[in-house]
Image (tube, rainbow, N blue to C red):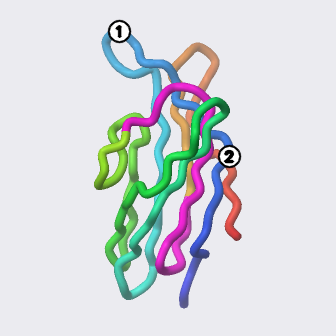
């Protein structure tokens, strides 16, 4: 059974601040490829106060899940996401299932998924 969609939008990207000894949290994009061929993925990032960044490339082998930490350089291009609000538009060559999550270690915070929408 084929699962997923080719286009996903995550509107609430906002990396938690970095701490002195370790990050106070991180965000991650999890991608499930249940298909029989590799998923070639292109990300577009939208910002409040900057021009969009297109052409960030990821791949997920068939029948695999991959987690991409967004506080590390992202994609084959090793793009460093700047602090502040951003959104992610994901386009895949094959249907995938995606989830975006945030771990925030500041007081009274936790891990939580961020709703994404498939188109």
The residue under the point 59% across, 13% down is 107
| C-alpha span from label 1 to label 2 | 28 Å
Stretch in magenta = 80-98
Badge 1 density bin: few <14, some 14–19, many ≥20, Cα 10 Å = few
Q: Nearer the viewer, residue 52 or 19?
A: 52
Give the quarter of the figure containing the N terminus: bottom right
Residue at disc 2, secondary structure: strand
Single out the mark in the foreground, 1 or 2: 2
Coordinates of residue 48 in the picture (x, y in percent): 67, 33
Magenta run includes residue 63: no
Q: Which of 93 and 112 is in front in this view?
A: 93
Residue at disc 1, secondary structure: loop
The residue under the point 43% across, 57% down is 55
The numbered dot on residue 11 is 2
Coordinates of residue 22 in the picture (x, y in percent): 34, 18
Chain-order first, disc 1 or disc 2: 2
- State the residue position of label 1: 20
């Amino acid at each position: 059974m084929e699962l997923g969609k080719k286009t996903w939008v995550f509107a609430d990207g906002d990396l938690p601040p970095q701490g002195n000894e370790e990050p106070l949290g991180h965000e991650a994009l999890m991608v499930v490829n249940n298909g029989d061929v590799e998923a070639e993925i292109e990300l577009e990032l939208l910002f409040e106060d900057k021009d969009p960044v297109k052409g960030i490339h990821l791949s997920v082998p068939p029948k695999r899940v991959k987690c991409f930490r967004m506080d590390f350089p992202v994609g084959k291009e090793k793009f460093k996401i700047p602090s502040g609000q951003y959104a992610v538009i994901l386009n895949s060559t094959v249907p995938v299932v995606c989830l975006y999550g945030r771990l925030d270690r500041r007081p009274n915070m936790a891990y939580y998924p961020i709703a994404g929408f498939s188109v």
